[in-house]
Amino acid sequence: MNGRWNIIKYSLILLLGFAVILVGLGISFLHQMQEASGTNTTVEYLYIEPGSGVIRVAWKAEQQGLVSKAWRLRLLSRYHGFNGRIIAGEYEIAPNTTLQALLVQITEGKVYQRRLVVPEGFSSQAVLSLIDANDYLDHDVDITPAEGSLLPETYFFSRGDKASALIKRMQVAQEGFLAEVWPDMMTIGKLKTADEILTLASIIEKETGLNGERNLVSAVFHNRLNKRMRLDSDPTVIYGIVGGGELGRPLKKSELKAVTDYNTYRIYGLPPTPIANPGKAAIEAALSPAPVDYLYFVADGKGGHRFAETLREHNANVRRWRRDKKK
């Protein structure tokens, strides 16, 4: 009897030993597996669509070289209790990312942020074209936003975000910035409304891109408005011809003489709407014209402008510009 009991006892001990060894081997295998990295040698972007389960995510990860075998991600996900915790979105996966780090990344929702740069002076039509050309947005917009209503900035978004939501952010940003720099909404010269501020700012934006000139250009236009002189701004004429598009050629004399709502060679005051989306610097310049008596400016042939208080000075600057142009 004792001999049989000893055999059973030794057998149980042996089985338990095997079990301990197997568990140890399993844990060691899982540890090695979770520390293994993918085969991708460059950054990869893993996009997990809403509603995707661990099976589909594992398959995509294998296809992109982020894991060597899909089943390994599924097994480790179950082992750590990550099933059902994967968050939809786009993830930036660096080379040599371990399987464990990958799982942590996609279950903590560390979603990659893409960016859209909206340059100063872009028309709303041009901004919409920029958005339409972006493959990572949900294009749900078919109406061009009001001119001047978008703040040029760098905007971050997640893949799959709606374009309409991004445009709304641009509009809120424009309204917020204007309220910040013009909190009391007081009259600035002849300008009384936000639309008028944005309209003048858009003209300044299209006339010069130099930081040191914006307040001078603003002063010219403010002085002209105060004296009831026409603004004589080429960019407004161009906008009256092509809207938010590009003319692609010099203006014709006939176009400068044509009567349109935007031809400031023929109308007094501001055009009816902005002609572009002005940036922060142009808006600030519209609100803060330089304390000078300039009424004219012309290109200096070097990317800037020469300013003048009198028509005689201005004509001399024009002649100088023409001479320099011929050289």
Image: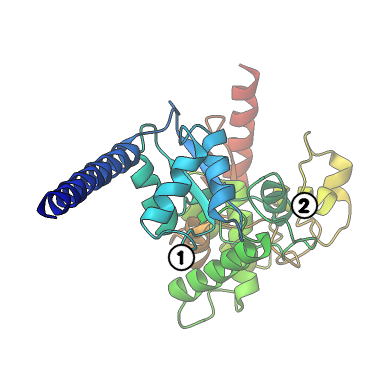
* Residue 294 visible in the shown view: no
- Residue at horizontal 48 percent and vertical 69 percent from the top: 177
Quadrant of residue 147 within the rendered picture: bottom right
Q: Is residue 18 above or below residue 104?
A: above
Instruction: Give x and y (percent) for residue 20.
Output: 21, 47
Is 188 on the left or on the right of 318, as rendered?
A: left
**Disc number at residue 288?**
1
Q: Say which residue label 2 marks.
A: 239
Q: Residues within 10 Å of mark 1 (few under 14, many from 20)?
A: some
Is 183 on the left or on the right of 247, as rendered?
A: left
Sequence-earlier tag: 1 or 2:
2
Q: Nearer the viewer, residue 281 or 323?
A: 281
Is 134 on the left or on the right of 140, as rendered?
A: left
- Farthest left residue? 2
- Look at the numbered disc 2 and give the secondary structure of its residue: helix
Quadrant of residue 199 within the rendered picture: bottom right
Quadrant of residue 247 within the rendered picture: top right
- Look at the numbered disc 1 and give the secondary structure of its residue: loop
* Residue 299 visible in the shown view: yes
